[in-house]
Image (cartoon, grey):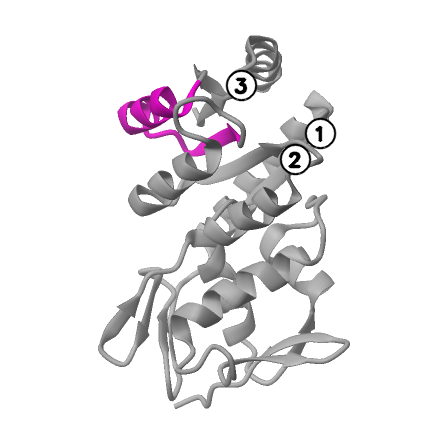
Amino acid sequence: MTHILVVDDEASIRKLVEAYLRAEGFEITTAEDGEQALARFRRHQPELVVLDIMLPKLDGLEVLQHIRRESDAYVLLLTARSEEEDRVIGLTVGADDYLTKPFSPRELVARVKAILRRGRAAHEKRGRVLNFRHIRIDERRHEVWRGEERVELTALEFKLLQALARYPGMVFSREKLLEQVWGYDFYGEARVVDVHIGHIRQKIEPDPSRPRIIQTVRGVGYKFADEPL
């Protein structure tokens, strides 16, 4: 049974989300502040966290940073409409998706299922090693190497890099990358792709300000341009 941690300081939201997710067969643990969230995350090791940004003690972005240092668990952020900057930061740090308050519980359930579906699909694919001039991608081990240095990517960053690297030179639109990496059920904005591409570039490019591995094709999208070996 998939275990989900629901974190929100409003009891009414926690109870509503818990009720809908339990009805779909998920095992649920809840937390009402950031410190409690981390303690329960470490104790229960859930596969997915529904995480509000505005929390007492530790805010949601701090909790997300701690989670990303310890785990590749999926994270769905809950944000207020006024928290656009925090939303972008959250996606940069490693959130997999976000949902803006007020939200429909049915939409939240749909988002959760979409995240978990694309996770299962990724694990079902047979892995191989993709070798390029500057980087090496081990699909089976979910590892990326730049020379002798291992590059630490989040699970979502790895999937995005993998989607591009499997077809060197092919130009992918943002919409196509959303479809392949986030899934057909993703409801967010296409610019989430730009946020994650920027984060990957900071980790793999010799000079992120002049990217050579993942190149922007103006008005279209992105292509993987490293030379295969």
The crowd level at tag 1 (other Cα within 10 Å; few <14, some 14-19, many 20+) is: few
The magenta stretch is 33-52
Describe the element under mark 3 as helix, strand or loop: loop
> Three-letter amino acid code at disc 1?
Glu
- Residue at 53%, 49% in the rendered image: 89
User: Label 1: which residue?
Assistant: 107
Would you identify the image quadrant in which residue 117 lies?
A: top right
**Of the image marks 1 and 3, the number of the one nearer the N terminus:** 3
Q: Nearer the viewer, residue 17 or 209?
A: 209
Describe the element under mark 1 as helix, strand or loop: helix
User: Label 3: which residue?
Assistant: 25
User: Label 2: which residue?
Assistant: 99
- Residue 17 placement, left or right of 188: left
Queried whether the magenta region covers residue 42, the answer comes back as: yes
**Which of the two discs, 1 and 3, sits closer to the camera?**
1
The crowd level at tag 2 (other Cα within 10 Å; few <14, some 14-19, many 20+) is: many
Residue 229 image position (x, y, % from top left):
39, 90
Q: Are marks 2 and 1 in contact (CB under 8 Å)?
A: yes
**Which of the two discs, 3 and 2, sits closer to the camera?**
2
> Three-letter amino acid code at disc 2?
Leu
Queried whether the magenta region covers residue 112, the answer comes back as: no
In the picture as drawn, the residue positioned furthest to the right comes out as 219
The crowd level at tag 3 (other Cα within 10 Å; few <14, some 14-19, many 20+) is: few
